[in-house]
Image (cartoon, grey):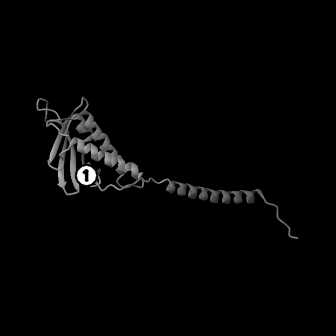
Amino acid sequence: MTEKRPETDGDILSRSKALSGSALRRAQERAQRQANDRRYSVDLPAHMAECDANYVRLLRLFPDLRDKSDQTINLPLQALNAQVVFTVLEKGPYTTLVQIDVQDGRDGSQDSDSPPAWINQVGAPTMTVRIYHDARSAEVVSYQAQNRFHSSYEYPNTRMRQRDEKVQLNRFLSEFLTLCLEHGASHNPVAF
């Protein structure tokens, strides 16, 4: 018969620290696995629906896109008096590349040397949109001189882009085109 030595308080404490350390490591590893499982993934059907709706909105604003090289829409809002200029950069049989610029819409009667406050605060927005005529879809390919947007990003990243940057840009295009449709006015009559 072997004789067991009674445990001392020090033995119990050292064993509990070792167990709690390994339990802490296991809990951290489990939390890391759960975080990896929660990575952002694109809701592709919703994203494509947004791009398809943007195609329809763009064609409502610029119906003769394949024939003309530019279209100007005025946005005479109280907080934002601007002109939205759609310029065709490239034309292909199945795609068109359109640049959308927002410019100061004030007439020459005001002080035109200084830009309005909204341009000073955020800069004049500009984006490039690729329109896929065969797929009837439109997607942002460049915004404020930044391009090559991935479908998702790890966060944080070197460019500090959001996990769903591409989805957010196309949603912004949707909201912006809706604003143009609801409040915009064209110098030239738009034929539907």
Report helix, strand or loop for mark 1.
Answer: strand
User: Can you say whether 190 is above or below 22 in the image?
Assistant: above
Question: Residue furthest toward the front?
Answer: 192
Q: Is residue 156 left or right of residue 120?
A: right
- Give percent across and percent down for residue 84: 20, 40
In depth, the one of 173 and 105 nearer the eye is 173
Q: Is residue 44 left or right of residue 56?
A: right
Q: Tell me the kind of residue under disc 1.
A: Ile
Give the quadrant of residue 186: top left
Residue depicted at 15% across the width and 36% down the height: 189
Give the quadrant of residue 80: top left
Question: Residue furthest toward the left?
Answer: 108
Residue depicted at 29% across the width and 38% down the height: 178
Say if residue 165 shows up in the picture: no
Residue depicted at 22% across the width and 53% down the height: 97
The residue wearing badge 1 is: 131
- Give percent across and percent down for residue 135: 29, 54
- Give percent across and percent down for residue 13: 72, 56
Say if residue 127 shows up in the picture: yes
Q: Is residue 42 left or right of residue 90?
A: right
